[in-house]
Each structure stands twice: as C-alpha cells, then as structure tokens.
Image: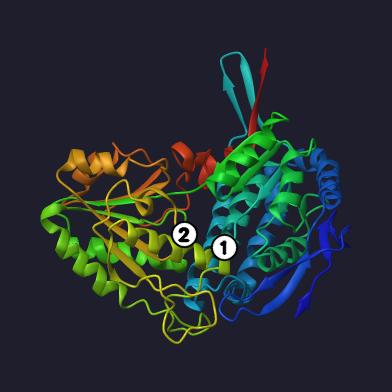
C-alpha cells in the first residue's frame, strides 16, 4: 500500500500539517491501496498563501510565456497516458478501455485545446474611448469530483493558468491519486513555485476552508447540487466569484420519424458509461407512446451487453461504482422505483451474480416511469435508465423541462432541423442532435440547479478573467 503524507505547496512536496489520513479503496476489490493526508485548514492556508505570493508575477506574464510550461504539461500528460489510465482504474473502477479512451485521453485533448485558444486570444480590445483589458481573476480554488477525476482537474486548472491565475486544487477524497500524479507532471513542467498547489482532504474540512479563505478570489466547483449550494454560501460571505458545475437529470427525446433503434442503443451506452457516474448522462429516455414498448424491448436487449466485471479486463464494459455508499444509494433508488410502480426490464437492485466483492450494480432499465417519480426527478449517479412515454411534442417538452436540472440532453428526429427546433425549447445547457459528438471547444454548463458559469473552450477561459477598462 502506498502511504503519502505530503501536500504539494509552493513548488515542493511538504509534510501535511495534520496527522489524519484518508484511505483510498479499489472499488472492484474493496482493498485499501493507498492513503493520503486529510488536509487541515492550516494546510489550506499555506497553499493559499503560496498561491497569493505567486499571483502577481504569474499574472504579469505574457500569453507566450505561459504557453511554454503549459505545453510541457500537455506533453507530460501525453507521456503518462498509460499510468493515468491505470491509476483511474485502480481508484475509481473505470474499465480499462474507458479509462484509456476517455479518462486519460479527454484531459489531454482539453489541455491541447487551451494551447490553441491561448495562442490566439485577444486580451485587450478597444471600445470607443476605452481600452478594455482581460485580466486574471486572481487566486482560484479548484474543487473537483471523483467521477472524471483528471478531466475535471484539467478543465479547471489549465484555463485558470492560461488566464494568468494561480490555483489551489482540492480533489475528491475518493480519487486523490490521479490528482497527485497530475501534480507531479505539473512540477516536471517547470511552473514557478506557488502557481499550482495541491491539498488533499475531505470536503467538510479542506474544501470548506478553501471556499471560505479570504485569500481566494474565485471558487470553481464541480459536484452535487447540494454541496454546490453550500460552497456558494461559504464563498458568498467573502463576495467571491463562484463557478458551479452541478447535477443533472438529462432527457433524451426521441421524436417520431427518428431512427428509434439507434437512438435507444446510443442512450443505453450513454447511461452505462463510467458505471452511470456521469453528470450529463441521459437518464430519462422519452419515447412517443406509439413506439414505447418497442423502445423498451430495444433497451432491455442492449442492457444485456453490459455485464459487470473486472475493470482491468479489456472485455469489461461496466465496472463498479466508486464506493459502498454510492452502491447502496443506487440500489435504494431502484427499490424506490419499483415501490412507486416502475417495471424492471433489465437489472434490478440485487447484487450481480458472482460479484460478492466490489461495489457493483446490475445495469438497470426501468419502464412505466412517470414524470413525477423519484427516479425521474433526482440524480441517481449509477447505471439506471428510466423510460417515459409522451403523447405529443408539447407533452415531451413539458416532461423534458420538468425537473430542477438543466445540464445536458439529446434530441433525435427525422432530420437535424426538426430536432434542433425542439432542442431550442429545452431548458438545458448542452444538447446533442441526432447523436452529435461531444465538442471540447463548446461551452459546457447548466441551467437552473445544474450550475452557474461555463467550462471548456473560450468560455471556459473567460470564467477566469475579469475586465478592466481605461478611458482616454
């Protein structure tokens, strides 16, 4: 077992100022594979002070000067792709294929995208008799989740650094190992001391201390809506800027005339990817009542291909969920759905056969789900798909918009124009039309309780900038 007792602060690994540790479990074996420091408020204070000391110098650098270490960071991520993937498999349970193709590859692509954006971004503009400068927001607290543990780190840290900000990162306690690996790559890239800092710890201690620290100018948080609300409350006391990427209950709407089989099969893969632990997952499939039973049958057949198993095997498509609490939570939602009248057409709340060890969930498809059912309103964060029927387009739109979330979604129709017209009425931040591919340059973020602000692309860079105007 790896035992880590240090934090990355001020350009070096230093002993944590606390004595408590956090065990890191392998979700497939339930074995403790490592431990990291449970950072204290004193650790956070040291990291913020280091970031504050480096802020003016880093903020005064030119985009070209910032590009040099950022390029070395990108190259470091590329060189350690296999190690990154293996680390995510070990601490999160993502199947090795998904860990390689998404968990390790997506952050590399996002990091590369910001090299291009930074090289071409105009940090000044002339507006009448004013010169407007886009200046760094200052010291950033980046608090990241466990489900895409490196992608979310890169999606916050890289644009913040590109903007000229300095950063203190607090990763999720379930997946701190890939964040430590990222810190090693950052160190090797040669950033000035204090520009990037890492403090591991639990949210209620290190996360709260970071969000409320007077030396922090902006808090960027990804996680649950409940925790996001608490982060905003803490940060609000200091009138800090807050960027929140929170929960989702996304609808995938299949309109009459669409390719039903393709739409349903893609939806099943979307929901079961990463064991359902994706905030953008299309967990509600909306199908016209005349095609409902056909869609249910297609989904049940597709779900049978997702057999839970050892995430280190290349054949495995569905690994465990992150921990025992999450496993029990997801199973509880399935039981609630059945109690409320849902029909289980695949999976169910029972443990998968032959997998007594590990935090595994049977891939589940629920039919006869009503719009007001618990599983149609609350984020489950597991491999559970709910299928709902609608009468007409107006009814479909009412259901699609009928939750407190608005993060992502999909629309399928006979042509892109019809699908896009429907999508324009959806209260959500990002919608795929007829299976459109994910675009890391497009702004990502939500409506309603799915968050505030945007990540990725130019909009993601601008979250970490603030305008200053000089009148002549």
Describe the element under mark 2 as helix, strand or loop: loop
Where residue 452 appears, as percent x and y from the top left, is 53, 37
The crowding category of the residue bearing disc 1, from other C-alpha atoms within 10 Å (few below 14, some 14 to 19, many at least 20), is many
User: Residue, x 89% and y 63% (percent of image)?
Assistant: 15
Pick whichever, 72 or 341, lies toward us.
Answer: 341
User: Residue, x 16% and y 58% (percent of image)?
Assistant: 292
Describe the element under mark 1 as helix, strand or loop: helix
Q: Which residue is mark 2?
A: 381
Where residue 312 appears, as percent x and y from the top left, is 53, 83
The nearer-to-camera label among 1 and 2 is 2
Q: In the current view of this chain or complex, which residue is farthest to the bottom? A: 354
Where residue 321 appears, as percent x and y from the top left, is 51, 69
Tell me the quarter of the picture where residue 472 sits: top right
User: Residue, x 69% and y 32% (percent of image)?
Assistant: 240
Pick whichever, 467 or 319, lies toward us.
Answer: 319
- Observer able to see residue 47: yes
- Observer able to see residue 136: no
Q: Which residue is mark 1?
A: 108
Q: From mark 1 to mark 2, how far is it between C-alphas?
A: 25 Å
> In this image, 29 relative to 217: left or right?
left
Where residue 67 appears, as percent x and y from the top left, is 67, 51
269 is higher (above) or lower (below) than 64 = below
Q: Which mark is residue 70?
A: none
> In this image, 210 relative to 332: left or right?
right
User: Residue, x 44% and y 49% (percent of image)?
Assistant: 248
The mark tally for this picture is 2
């Amino acid at each position: 077992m790896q035992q880590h007792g240090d934090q990355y602060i001020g350009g070096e690994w230093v002993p944590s100022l606390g004595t408590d540790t956090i065990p890191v479990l392998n979700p497939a074996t339930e074995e403790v594979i490592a431990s990291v420091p449970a950072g204290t408020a004193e650790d956070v204070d040291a990291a913020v002070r280091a970031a504050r000391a480096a802020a003016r110098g880093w903020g005064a650098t030119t985009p070209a000067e910032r590009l040099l270490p950022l390029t070395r960071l990108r190259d470091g991520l590329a060189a350690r792709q296999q190690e990154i993937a293996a680390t995510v498999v070990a601490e999160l349970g993502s199947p090795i294929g998904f860990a390689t193709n998404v968990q390790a590859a997506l952050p590399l692509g996002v990091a590369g995208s910001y090299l291009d954006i930074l090289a071409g971004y105009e940090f000044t503009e002339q507006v009448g008799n004013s010169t407007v400068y886009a200046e760094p927001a200052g010291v950033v607290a980046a608090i990241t989740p466990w489900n895409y543990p490196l992608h979310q780190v890169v999606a916050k840290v890289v644009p913040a650094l590109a903007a000229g900000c300095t950063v203190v990162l607090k990763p999720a306690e379930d997946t701190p190992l890939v964040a430590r690996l990222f810190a090693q790559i950052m160190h090797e890239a040669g950033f000035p001391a204090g520009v990037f800092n890492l403090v591991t710890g639990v949210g209620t201690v290190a996360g709260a201390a970071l969000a409320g620290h007077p030396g922090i100018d902006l808090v960027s948080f990804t996680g649950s809506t409940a925790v996001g609300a608490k982060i905003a409350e803490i940060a609000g006391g200091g009138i800090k800027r807050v960027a929140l990427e929170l929960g989702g209950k996304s609808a995938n709407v299949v309109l009459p005339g669409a390719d039903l089989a393709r739409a349903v099969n893609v939806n099943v893969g979307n929901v079961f990817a990463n064991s359902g632990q994706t905030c953008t997952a299309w967990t509600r499939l909306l199908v016209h009542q005349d095609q409902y039973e056909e869609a249910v049958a297609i989904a049940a057949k597709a779900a049978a291909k997702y057999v839970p198993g050892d995430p280190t095997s290349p054949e495995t498509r569905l690994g465990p969920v992150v921990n025992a609490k999450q496993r029990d939570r997801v199973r509880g939602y399935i039981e609630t759905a059945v109690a409320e009248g849902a029909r289980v057409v695949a999976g169910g709340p029972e443990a998968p056969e032959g997998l007594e060890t590990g935090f595994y969930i049977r891939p589940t498809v629920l039919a006869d789900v009503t719009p007001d059912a618990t599983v149609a309103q609350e984020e489950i964060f597991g491999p559970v798909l709910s299928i709902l029927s609608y009468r007409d387009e107006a009814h479909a739109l009412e259901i699609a918009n009928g939750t407190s979330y608005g993060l992502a979604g999909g629309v399928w129709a006979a042509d892109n124009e019809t699908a896009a017209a429907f999508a324009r009425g959806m209260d959500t931040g990002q919608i795929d039309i007829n299976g459109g591919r994910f675009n890391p340059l497009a702004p990502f973020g939500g409506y309603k309780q799915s968050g505030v602000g945007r990540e990725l692309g130019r909009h993601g860079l601008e979250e970490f900038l603030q305008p200053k105007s000089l009148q002549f």
